[in-house]
Image (cartoon, helix red, strand yellow):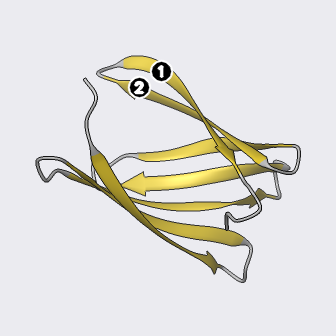
Amino acid sequence: PPSKWTAKVKSEWALGGHWLMSDTEVVFDGGQQMRFREYMGWDGENHRYVQVAVNNMGEGVLNRVHFVGDDTMVLMMQNSREGTPQAERSVTKFGADSQ
């Protein structure tokens, strides 16, 4: 079922400006909280963009990031829920006033 939530994100360049580090806090109606720390950057050894993320539920993931044109980022996520493999795709479009 749909749920309402709010999120706060703080991002800054880290590790010599090679990675974007973001701390995210999501608060759901009812008070449940999820916290994430992620690093997004270039994997020089494997020649690809990646996202490395951990959360307050004890999960850690390595996801592939694709850039489509000048204004679109596609994040491909593999995970499992209750033992069942899943895949998710997140698309972010950047505009003139997004930073």
Q: Identify whether 69 is placed above or below 87.
A: below
Q: Amino acid at mark 1?
A: Gln
Identify the disc placed on residue 7: none
Tell me, yes or no, whether the two marked residues, 2 and 1, touch with CB atoms within 8 Å: yes
Q: In which quadrant will I find the C terminus?
A: bottom right
Which label sits on residue 80? Answer: 2
In this rendering, the answer to whether 79 lies above or below 86 is below
Look at the picture and state if 82 lies above or below 58.
above
**Horizontally, is 53 left or right of 94 in the view?**
left
Q: Is residue 31 above or below residue 3?
A: below
Q: The disc labelled 2 sits on which kind of residue?
A: Ser
How far across and down, in percent of the image, does residue 80 sit? 41, 25
> Element at badge 1?
strand
Residue name at image x 67 percent, y 63 percent? 98
Give residue 65's position: percent from left, percent from top: 71, 44
Residue shown at 54%/24% (left/top)?
A: 87
Whole-angstrom CA distance, mark 2 to mark 1, is 5 Å
- Residue behind mark 1: 86
Q: Residues within 10 Å of mark 1 (few under 14, many from 20)?
A: few
